[in-house]
Image: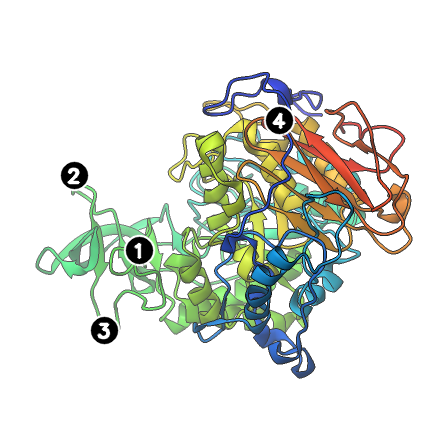
Amino acid sequence: MTGAIHSSRDSCLAPATLPIPGIQSSTPLFRLFHLTTSDHFVNNHATADMNELPEEKKPETIKVTPGRGTLKSSTTGLNRSKTGVSVLHPAVASIRSSVSFMRTSGSYDKPSSPVQPKRSLKKTSTRTEFRKARSNVNNVMIQFFEWNVPADQKHWKRLVEEAPRLANLGVHGVWIPPPTKGGSQYDVGYGVYDIWDLGEFDQKGTVNTKYGSKAELLEAIKACKENNIQVYLDAVLNHKMNGDELELFKVVEVDPDNRTNPVSDAYDIRSYTAFNFPGRNNQYSEFKWNFNHFTGVDYAEGQDKYAIYQILGENKGWALGVDSEHSNYDFLMGCDIDYSHPDVVEETKKWAIWVIKELGLSGFRYDALKHIDAPFIKDLVQHIKKETGNNSFFGVGEYWKPDLGALNHYLDDVDWDLSLFDVPLHFNFAAASKDGHNYDMRAIFDGTLVRDHPMQAVTFVDNHDSQPGQALDSWVEDWFKPLAYAIILLRSEGYPCLFYGDLYGISDPTPVEAKSDPLSKLLQARKLYAYGDEDDYFDHPSTVGWVRRGEAESSTPSKKSGCAVVLCASEAGDKRMYVGEGTSGQVWIDLMGYVQESVTIDDEGFGTFKAHGGSVSVWGIAEEPLKAQ
């Protein structure tokens, strides 16, 4: 371990003593056996996109069979198609029409106990197809940096050291920070200067980037591949910064709150829009950037103010395929790249293919997508797949907006050829962590991408932008972190992304302790146990749970035997849940090691599983709890 990975792996948040907003400590257990009749209990995963199914799997052929179990939580019952039209899915309509009958007639099969939480309904074929795709994989990716990682130029070496551990925890993909040259050796990578310099040339006062040299980057990628970990590069394509020379050109100032509204007459300014890259001396590319390649800047020499200057000229203007915030959100910072310019498009495509082959990449994380013209991104994604011959080249975009409609609209614009980070789910986690016992956990998936389009969703808890002290600070409180990670790691849907700052901690000036103990256990639980069909028990505002049934005839962890998960966002509680046929007499323990007593599955296949207040317990078949790694 190097000095930069600074927090002990053995540090553990004690579930019983975590500060939950609005809740006193040492609350006794209580039982949660009641049902409700709200729409929160309709199977929301009937709303997944039917357009991706083969003809024989279209909605009119789907059958939904009632059984013992709570109906799925938090849904509107609406299916948003790729055309943007919302329709009531037939499977949802079928469930709704039968709910009242089921609850009043007692016609469904149930155990002899008078009041039981029921098992969920049979899943739609959409959900089944999703699970088949994920059934033997359980992929996890990690964002292997946080904003305050030490600028010691040793981060690629840290990745070499950590790759075996990450693989052992079940990590299959690593999102690395931008490896391109920024304005100095301290640049996190988003003040991008030269995309062709990966820590190889003496530019901006340094050869290495903040993270190390190009040679060390290649060694880190080699170590990942040796541990069967794919590498995804953070591609910062929205802007350039730290230009080499001043240029004179004509602009108009625009209102920062309404970018389509000029607030000045046209006039000349001088700004650093000439990028000549003298230190690289034309290696890899001879392209030189000038003001014609940009749409706007935020710096004018001699002007003692911040302003957004739109560059004027023939065929110049803000991109149209961007977010509508501020009327047009093309401009973010620096020198905003103009993807209507054919030379810019050609240069960027050339770089993308070069860097993929040069480093042996398996995917891109696209930065700041709501500020980049969507038709260009669509074209670039298709170009990459064609030129590399790799239709499975992974792409996930940052579209930072907690608005499911905006995410769906963007996915339409790029022909559903990308995944997106589930920003709405992150904000639900943040709200739950701050509201404590006042937050209704049955609504945790409301308005989220993973609920509507799980195959497009990369789920996450926090990242470098949401960490304390950053511009998009929306930190999920520490007490709730294990609960949030249980939700993204132990469920069947979405591609979960672990944050470096949560596993290893965050450095000064806003230090945060690592949560390695609970997170490493949850990662092992995903790797060993979280397989098979999923039955939900989202029937209480603060204590919720679900069961993963495991794979057929499984009885040991090595055979993916399934698990039962209980989350208590308020007082301690328990949940009686069905874990499958043939489980009678099995003894399950809390794999997290928090609840000491074991659970013996009864003759009906049910067990009553507990969790402490403000905590999560993961139950499964094992001789002893999982050990932190």
Q: Does residue 507 appear in this view?
A: yes
Q: Is residue 556 above or below residue 70?
A: above
Residue in the picture at 77% in, 43% down:
563
Residue topped by disc 4: 572
Compute the Cα span from label 1 to label 4: 48 Å
Per the rendering, the mark at residue 314 is 3
Outermost residue to the left: 265
Q: Does residue 395 appear in this view?
A: no
Closer mark to the observer between disc 3 and disc 1 = 1
Query: In terms of sequence position, does the residue under pointer 1 or pointer 2 come before the other?
Result: 2
Compute the Cα span from label 2 to label 3: 28 Å
Q: Amino acid at mark 1?
A: Phe
| Circle 1 residues within 10 Å: few <14, some 14–19, many ≥20 | many
Residue topped by disc 2: 304
Quadrant of the image for the C terminus? top right
Query: In terms of sequence position, does the residue under pointer 3 or pointer 1 come before the other?
Result: 3
Residue topped by disc 1: 331
Residue 68 in the figure: left or right of residue 484: right
Query: In terms of sequence position, does the residue under pointer 4 or pointer 3 come before the other?
Result: 3
Closer mark to the observer between disc 1 and disc 4 = 4
Q: Amino acid at mark 3?
A: Glu
